[in-house]
């Protein structure tokens, strides 16, 4: 019984590992991508090219420009001399932002008339535009505070002090790299499950049944490979994230590896459920794509789940990536404890159990 | 009409009939993308809306109630008042709230008496981008509250510089407008390789290759017919997505059709050729699927400028992105849809896309010739 199962698993391993090219496609691209995408993926901005039009003759306009000039976030690359020159600069994406200080800026400020500067942003790249806008607000706040202090004005009735917990420098790497790991592990695990459709294509299911293998044995053998490949990749990537990219991993590795294991089992279950009744590997591929694309988009990686319509928030409850993304982030950055890990792992367990049972039923009725 | 042309038309008609009968290709090319496009255009948003926000009020006064009200009315927050400091901090630590506004004794005392009352904004730094937005919104809400009280004459005048930000091309700041070009690029990067896999697979699977070879049509004619048919299927898919974007989703279309048509043809050619390259070179289906995902989907997701502004990435990554077709298409779509025909952006992008298409198609031709001989 056990020997039979081991034989079946060894067969699967051999099929995959005997071909040197599939060995390479299995190991190299995911790790390479972790590196490339980790460097590509950043929400942090610096040296944003901006245009400045300062029509103010007084000292305050100059001082404000100096603050933009001194900020590492901005780099003044164009000095248009009229409002009309701003439009082509933005249209051609030569600058991300234009700052326009009007002719009465200093006079208004001295006269207590709360002047306003115009800020034009390139809305094509909306996320960058919004980030840049927040830096403008910061610079203006600094300017206001210093102006008020220098001129003996009473401070505002209330002032805000902001602090970011867990990630005081607001590094976006800490968030993005764990998210990438989930995505890459999802791809690796799902594609490894497609091999079950090959049995159907080659009609070797029937042969296995004739040889006395039970559906449970076949499914177990077909699960071992995707789970172990996904798990090993995930573990390697986590170590790279920790030691190369400096992601903190505050909860230690035990909880992380357990979550990784649950995630790969749940994903394997989904993959097997989708592929085991497919007519061909091609059809299995299509089904897996139709699952993969929404799973990535609804996981809350790029766009927050709270901003989705309520219906989709419910749909995302079926997405194993959602739980893994949440738990790996919590473990890395927030240093979450076991109770929190539990809240994310039990849905993964339910997904794993349901999909594995479904796959088992599907393979069984096939006989 | 020469016999050759007639043969081509017949072969294309054969593909069309087979496709209509099998429907997998139609689903891949037409139904799937539209469903996913609508799902993502309406489903996902970059804005942090309805972020759960805790407001810890240590000592309730008219001032704290007034300020808390300002947070209640802001649509990007879902505010909850809490009166237990430990519970409030715990909720932030477990991620139940994305941010916490702390109005403690100092605020209650100082707000009325000497000014400069401290409003503490604590945000969950897990997602740096959301954290930044939450703290900006929170500071903005406090600033607005202050300004209103100034107007109402309840506190002294604020003598400070404000800014009038205007976001061009997307003045209502709808992230849908920004996301749609990227989603189209992303979906096409998946559909293209899938279609070419279908293109290669059918005859092989159904064993009809021999009967095709028995007809007067040459293998080359046969390939061309397939290419023309699947190319038009890909173009139809992209056209349909663009139509849905403009007429259903309501993304503005400020340019003209000419650059859009060119970009569509080139992009479809790139993706089909990429799919063919994968089908030809990979020995088994597993490798083919992995390569499709890793050369099609993921680069389109990460390196196209769809989610991450490449100008913020290190230079080697920017160079690498030059071989990602979606990168050019996302930029072309963003420009033609939101800005207009700005040829100083469109020309280099179209040029880059054309070079990629030529290289990929030439690569397919070279590989096929080597296989044949």
Image (cartoon, coloured by chain):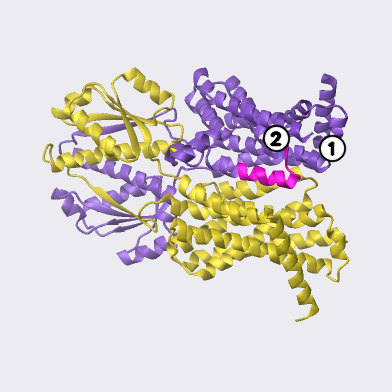
- Dot 1 falls on a residue whose secondary structure is helix
Range of residues picked out in magenta: A276-291
- The residue that label 1 is drawn on is A204
Q: Residue at x 40, y 40 (%)?
A: B48
- Tint applied to chain A in the drawing: purple
Q: Residue at x 66, y 44 (%)?
A: A287
Q: How many marks?
A: 2
- The numbered mark at residue B354 is none
- How packed mark 1 is, by other alpha carbons closer than 10 Å (few <14, some 14-19, many 20 or more), is few
- The residue that label 2 is drawn on is A272
The alpha-carbon separation of the residues under discs 1 and 2 comes to 16 Å
Residue A238: % across, % down: 61, 30
Q: Residue furthest bottom?
A: B1
Q: Are marks 1 and 2 in contact (CB under 8 Å)?
A: no
Q: Is residue B254 magenta?
A: no
The quarter of the image holding the N terminus of chain A is top right
Q: Nearer the viewer, residue B337 or A202?
A: A202
- Tint applied to chain B in the drawing: yellow
- Dot 2 falls on a residue whose secondary structure is helix
Residue A202: % across, % down: 83, 42
Q: Is residue A286 magenta?
A: yes
**Is the same chain shared between marks 1 and 2?**
yes
On the picture, is A35 further left or further right than B197?
left
For marks 1 and 2, the one nearer the N-term is 1
Q: Nearer the viewer, residue B44 or B318?
A: B44
- How packed mark 2 is, by other alpha carbons closer than 10 Å (few <14, some 14-19, many 20 or more), is many
Is residue B73 visible in the rendered structure shown here?
yes
Q: Nearer the viewer, residue A225 or B4?
A: B4
């Amino acid at each position: 019984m056990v020997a039979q199962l081991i034989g079946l698993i060894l067969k699967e391993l051999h099929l995959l590992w005997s071909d040197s090219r599939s060995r390479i496609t299995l190991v190299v691209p995911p790790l390479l991508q972790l590196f490339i995408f980790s460097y590509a993926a950043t929400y942090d901005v610096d040296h944003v090219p901006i245009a400045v039009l300062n029509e103010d003759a007084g000292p305050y306009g100059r001082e404000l420009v100096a603050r933009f000039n001194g900020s590492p976030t901005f780099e003044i690359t164009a000095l248009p001399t009229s409002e009309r020159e701003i439009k082509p600069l933005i249209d051609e994406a030569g600058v991300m932002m234009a700052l326009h200080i009007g002719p009465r800026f200093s006079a208004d400020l001295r006269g207590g008339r709360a002047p306003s500067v115009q800020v034009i942003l390139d809305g094509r790249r909306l996320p960058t535009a919004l980030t840049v806008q927040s830096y403008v607000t910061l610079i203006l706040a600094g300017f206001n505070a210093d102006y008020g202090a220098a001129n003996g004005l009473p401070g505002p009735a209330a002032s805000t002090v902001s602090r970011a917990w867990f990630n005081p420098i607001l590094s976006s790497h800490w968030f993005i790299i764990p998210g990438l790991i989930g995505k890459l592990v999802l791809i690796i695990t799902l594609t490894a499950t497609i091999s079950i459709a090959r049995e159907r294509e080659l009609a070797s299911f029937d042969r296995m049944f004739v040889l006395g293998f039970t559906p449970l044995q076949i499914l177990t053998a077909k699960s071992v490979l995707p789970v172990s490949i996904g798990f090993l990749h995930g573990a390697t990537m986590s170590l790279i994230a920790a030691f190369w990219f400096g992601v903190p991993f505050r909860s230690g590795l035990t909880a992380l590896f357990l979550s990784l294991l649950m995630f790969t089992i749940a994903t394997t279950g989904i993959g097997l459920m989708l592929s085991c009744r497919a007519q061909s590997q091609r059809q299995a591929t299509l089904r897996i794509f139709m699952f993969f694309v929404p799973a990535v988009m609804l996981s809350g990686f790029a766009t927050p789940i709270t901003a989705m319509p309520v219906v989709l928030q419910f749909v995302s409850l079926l997405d194993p990536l959602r739980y893994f993304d949440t738990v790996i982030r919590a473990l890395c950055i927030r240093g979450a404890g076991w109770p929190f890990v539990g809240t994310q792992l039990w849905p993964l367990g339910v997904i794993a159990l349901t999909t594995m049972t479904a796959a088992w039923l599907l393979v069984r009725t096939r006989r | 009409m020469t016999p050759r042309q007639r043969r081509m038309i017949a072969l294309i008609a054969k593909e069309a009939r087979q496709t209509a009968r099998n429907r997998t290709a139609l689903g891949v090319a037409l139904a799937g993308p539209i469903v996913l496009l609508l799902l993502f255009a309406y489903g996902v948003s970059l804005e942090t809306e309805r972020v759960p926000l805790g407001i810890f009020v240590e000592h309730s006064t008219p001032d704290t109630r007034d300020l808390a009200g300002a947070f209640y009315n802001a649509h990007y927050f879902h505010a909850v008042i809490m009166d237990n400091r430990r519970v409030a901090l715990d909720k932030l630590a477990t991620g139940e709230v994305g941010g916490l506004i702390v109005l403690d004794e100092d605020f209650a005392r100082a707000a009325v008496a000497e000014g400069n009352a401290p409003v503490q904004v604590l945000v969950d730094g897990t997602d740096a981008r959301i954290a930044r937005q939450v703290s900006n919104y929170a500071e903005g809400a406090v600033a607005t509250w202050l300004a209103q009280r100034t107007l109402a004459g309840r506190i002294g005048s604020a003598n400070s510089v404000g800014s009038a930000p205007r976001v061009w091309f997307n003045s209502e700041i709808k992230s849908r407008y920004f996301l749609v070009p990227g989603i189209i690029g992303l979906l096409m990067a998946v559909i293209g390789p899938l279609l070419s896999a279908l293109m290669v697979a059918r005859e092989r699977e159904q064993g009809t290759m021999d009967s095709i070879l028995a007809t007067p049509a040459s293998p080359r004619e046969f390939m061309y017919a397939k290419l023309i048919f699947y190319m038009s299927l890909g173009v139809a898919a992209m056209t349909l997505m663009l139509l849905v974007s403009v007429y259903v989703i309501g993304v503005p279309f400020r340019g003209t059709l000419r650059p859009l048509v060119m970009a569509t043809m080139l992009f479809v050619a790139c993706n089909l050729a990429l799919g063919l390259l994968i089908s030809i070179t990979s020995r088994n289906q597993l490798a083919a699927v992995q390569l499709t995902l890793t050369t099609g989907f993921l680069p389109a997701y990460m390196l196209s400028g769809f989610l991450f502004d490449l100008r913020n990435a290190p230079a080697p990554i920017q160079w690498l992105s030059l071989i990602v077709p979606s990168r050019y298409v996302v930029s072309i779509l963003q420009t033609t849809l939101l800005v207009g025909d700005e040829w100083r952006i469109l020309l280099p992008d179209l040029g880059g896309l054309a070079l990629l298409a030529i290289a990929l198609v030439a690569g397919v031709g070279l590989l096929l010739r080597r296989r044949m001989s």
